[in-house]
Image: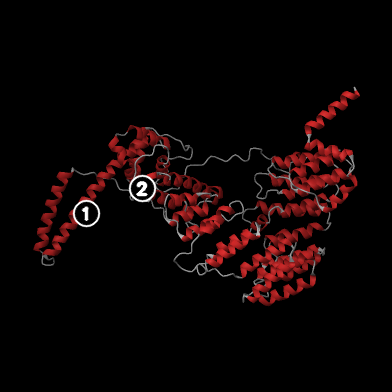
Amino acid sequence: MSQCVPCRISSHNRRPIRILSFLAPAVPIDRTTIGVSRRHFSSRESATFVPPPGRANCFLRANTRKQHRPRIDTGPGLRGFGIGLFRRNSSETDKLKESKSWSSGQAELRLRWHLMSSISRLFHNYSQEQSHKFLRLVAAEGRDVQAIGRVWGKLSAGDKLSFVNSIGSFLEEHTYWNMLNRLMEWYCTGTRPPGDPYKICGYFNAIVTAKIPTEKAGQDTKVSRDERRRRADKLIAMLRHIISRRDFKDRSYIAQSVLYKLIINASLDVLVGLRSELRKARLQVGRHTTLHFISRLSDLQTWDEAFSILKMFQLGKGPDLMLEKAWHVFLKMFYQATHIGQEESNEVIQKMLACNITPTTETYNVLMSKAVREGNEDTMKEAFQEMLQAGLNPSMVTYGILHKHYKQVGKQEEQVMVIRDAMMLDKRLNVILASDILHAKVLANASYTEVYMQFIRLFRPGALAALGLTSPARYPMLEKLEPNHYTVAIMMYAFCREDRGLRAAWRMYREYQRILGERTHPHRSVLVKAGSFIPNSFMMALGAHRGGLHYAATVMEEMLQEWSPIKPGVVSWSILLQILVKRGDMAEAEQLVDLMKARGAQPNAVTWTTLLNGYMVRHNLHKTGQIIARMSQMYMQPDRATIDKLTAYLNSQELLGGIRSIEEPEETQKQQQEEEEGKD
């Protein structure tokens, strides 16, 4: 038996996969932030770079001399400056009084305006001088958060009272967002320095607005989705520290737009419990912000908290939720509730009606989708009839659900009727329903030629022309649909299902890899969105030939590479496992299952059933019993055909011994030792 471990087979002109690929690279310094000079921060400097004192002062002076940050002139003392200002304005007032164009009242107002603006500039410059002093001390200590703590320890009791407010106001005014962020991080430590709650909340609002730009931001301020999530998670941790202080209750204000940014971009596990903490701190959480909380937490993992928030949601005063399209949030909760239980679904429906949200076509589509998922045709028809009786018109999604059910049960006449009704709504159908028509032909074991002829009637060439499966269009086909990832995956499966030879399948796979390698290719995104479905089809086509194991293992290994945009799923591992089982390489199949677990993919019932059938065919009942015990521990069961095969071995002692070796390993070892001693 030859060694066929897939991890040992390296693809052509590729390096082997790196085990430590999960290590994230170091986060570079954000030099694009406004106010950071490129001269004084090199890309070679680390995030904890501590500049020498002279250079730190030079950095501060260079930044304050910019046009939008003018150099601050402290001026003379308060007494002398005020007297000189009053005398100068008095002389100007006398000239204005002598002028014929100005009345005495206007001249007096002019004098007061000059005086008040000059005094305000005086106090502004005095406060800026204090912040400059603090900033020079911080810059001399270093650029990290601990530097602020070291400066804080050296200040007098009087300076500590105004330290946070003076520095924060200066940094916010001159848009030093990174330095303001470090100041807030230090503020949220255990030091708990004094500060105005309203100003602290203002600093936090400014940081969130600057650090998490909107989707419509320019190219210079765009941030990737992963980076926005990382920043939002850190800012939520900062918000939790801010609102946990006792002096912030009833004295803090976080903008609703800021909360919206945090909710949309943060991770789900970070959002858990945040709304209850905001309410405990007596912060205002608006109606729309509450709906955003519910929408983000409506995932199955956090559905319980979203459901508890929905129960406490009050309609209140404001525009109609139906007009504001807030019903999408309730519909999302209702869809998730259909996966949980009937009681939860009924409670969501009652809450929708209490909030004056009437059922729509999408609501009945969710009910029909649940019936199709459960295989209940009568319930699906009842929901469809209730939709029509409510005066609602079916959509393309409705017809797609009906067609999907009739496709699964094999009722071709009903499929034709659904397609006819859908074409009366729109002759072009839609991409999902048209792709489902192709899938129905594939499930009916139609040839690739028949599937292809149906494809060219409904779709444009699209990505299939790039793969060489069809000729490109010579003229615009506006009346036809553009194939999406689902369509392309169905056509590739239909192509690979027919036996075209090992070379033809491998040539098509290399063309597929070439398109994936070109990042600017117009059809690359469609192939990437199809995921591992297309490589799985190639693995089945290649593994069906004698000598195709090497090629199938190469497909798997290329998906395991760091540079690959497509990662293997449980189905991919199960397909390769089935190829090994058919060859009789059971030892390599066991190694593949171990490698699968090491890569983070947990075997499912199909994986264990494939391995189980392999041992049953070879009459290895001890291994068969071990796999049955493993599946029982994970609450899995094989398919009906495998269970029927197992009934012939129910009285086998070897099968029971394999089961006991997993369920009772200690007793099995003792029995083996006693048998060996008896033989001696």
- Residue 539 in sight in this render: yes
Q: Residue furthest top?
A: 680
Identify the residue position indicated by label 2 in the image.
197
Q: Position of residue 557 (x, y in %)?
A: 72, 44
Binning the other alpha carbons within 10 Å of mark 1 as few (below 14), some (14 to 19) or many (20 upward) gives few
Q: Are marks 1 and 2 in contact (CB under 8 Å)?
A: no
Distance, label 1 to label 2, CA atoms, is: 28 Å
Q: Position of residue 176 (x, y in %)?
A: 39, 46
> To which quarter of the image does residue 497 belong?
bottom right
Tell me which label, 1 or 2, sits earlier in the chain. Answer: 1
Q: Is label 1 or label 2 in front?
A: 2
Who is closer to the viewer here, 648 or 181?
Answer: 648
- Residue 437 in sight in this render: no
Q: Amino acid at mark 2?
A: Pro
Who is closer to the viewer here, 643 or 602?
Answer: 643
Q: Could you tell me which secondary element the residue under label 1 belongs to?
A: helix
Identify the residue position indicated by label 1 in the image.
117
> To which quarter of the image does residue 133 belong?
top left
Q: Position of residue 455 (x, y in %)?
A: 74, 67
Q: Amino acid at mark 1?
A: Ser
